[in-house]
Amino acid sequence: MSAANPTDPASGPVAAASTDGADRANQVRCSNCDAPLLGPFCYECGQSLKSPIRELTSLVVDLFEFITDVDGRFVKSLGLLYCRPGRLSMRYLGGERVRFMRPLRMYLGLSIILFLAVSLTNTVETEVRVDGSGVNITGPSEQVEPMSAEEMAAEARAIQQLDPSSAEFRERIAAHAERAAAQGQQAIREAQKDIPAEFRERPDVRFNDKDWDKETNPLIISWLPDAANEALNELIGKAVDNVTKVQDDPQRLMDAFMDVLPQTMFVLLPLFALLLKLVYLFKKRLYVEHLIVALHSHSFLFLSFLLLWAFAELSALWPVIETPLTWLMIAVGTWIPVYLFLTQKRVYAQGWIMTTIKYGFVGTLYLIMLSIGALTALVISLVRL
């Protein structure tokens, strides 16, 4: 082997230096720390090669992928989540994390899709009335075709010509009375829309067997400071005043409620994990492990509710397939409690009797928490109108 000639510019240190310089010039380097990049992320500082400064459509795609992790893991995770109770939690806790969608992203992705779908398609068909007994929420008010006074009188005269003992007489007089009442209520509702809010009848809110009043009969909670009680009564006053807005447009309350409900569910999530931690205290699992089980359980619920919503919408669009879709909805509704029970049994590995007792206890407490959360969200929605 011939030795390299140090005077030859094609070999030796000069050539090596020039080659290294060329490689360095051609190699992609991190814009943040100038380290050579061996992949899409810098091994020195962690910065991504992909720049956030690019077309808006690309950023939207990245946001959707960030929320849902849409790739093979998405389908694999949802399939395992829905069809194999507890398996996804067990495999994730056992160390198989890269191949599955992260629990928090799954929860956020499904909750966003569910609440967005319900918000865009939900319409309120209720009537909100205020009378002496308070606020009454009833079913949809049927809009009757108005009849003039002459037409109503002609119908009454025609009924008088019938035999009072006949079935036709009874049917027509009942229908006539019902129409007259509905037409009168409809006229009252239309007239009330023109009354300014400050002159409308306010709902009755009673405390200590007296009508609530911010000055003369406020709601006082003894263990709260004066400033908190004052703020509480301010909120009650706003809620009472906003009832008139709901009378004119009940959809506003539902829209506000759907805005607050996801935040309420997110607050209840760690409380549910804490409940699991207390019930399974002797299992010596970390709180984060219970939180992962809670995230997967809520993700399953969101996915089930999304399926129920989709089946209901399809049933309304195509009545011809209403029967099979109804059976599918029954199957999904039945699977929810069965799935949650099997998840608790499989993840915490206790006997059937103990699992049944703890499942009933956790379920009852969480239903109470959900009821309180939903009521709180409703009150907040009413205040924020």
Image: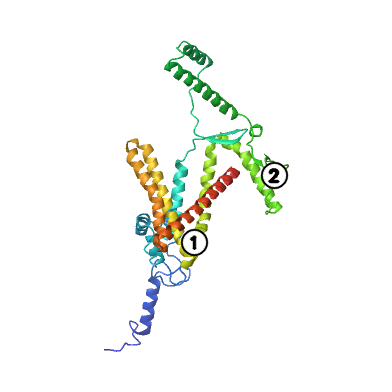
Figure quadrant of the C terminus? top right
- Identified by mark 1, the residue type is Val
Please state which of residues 2 and 271 is positioned toward the viewer in this rendering: 271
Please state which of residues 316 and 272 is positioned toward the viewer in this rendering: 272
Label 2: which secondary element = loop
Residue 62: horizontal and vertical position, in percent?
42, 56
Q: Residues within 10 Å of mark 1 (few under 14, many from 20)?
A: some
Please state which of residues 365 and 84 is positioned toward the viewer in this rendering: 365
- Identified by mark 2, the residue type is Pro
Q: Which residue is mark 1?
A: 279
- Look at 47% across and 53% down and name the residue there: 363
Please state which of residues 151 and 163 is positioned toward the viewer in this rendering: 163
* Relative horizontal placement of residue 99, taking residue 44 as reference (left or right): left
In this rendering, the answer to whether 271 lies above or below 312 is below
Occupied quadrant, residue 63: bottom left
Residue 228: horizontal and vertical position, in percent?
67, 52
Tell me, what colour scheme is on the image? rainbow
Looking at the image, which residue sits at the far front? 353
Q: Which residue is mark 2?
A: 218
- Look at 32% across and 41% down and name the residue there: 324
Nearest to N terminus: mark 1 or mark 2? 2
Looking at the image, which residue sits at the far right? 216
Residue 261: horizontal and vertical position, in percent?
52, 48
Occupied quadrant, residue 93: bottom left
Label 1: which secondary element = helix
Figure quadrant of the N terminus? bottom left
In this rendering, the answer to whether 123 lies above or below 371 is above
- Look at 61% across and 34% down and name the residue there: 133
Q: Can residue 58 be seen from the camera position used here?
A: no
The Cα–Cα distance between marks 1 and 2, rounded to whole angstroms, is 39 Å
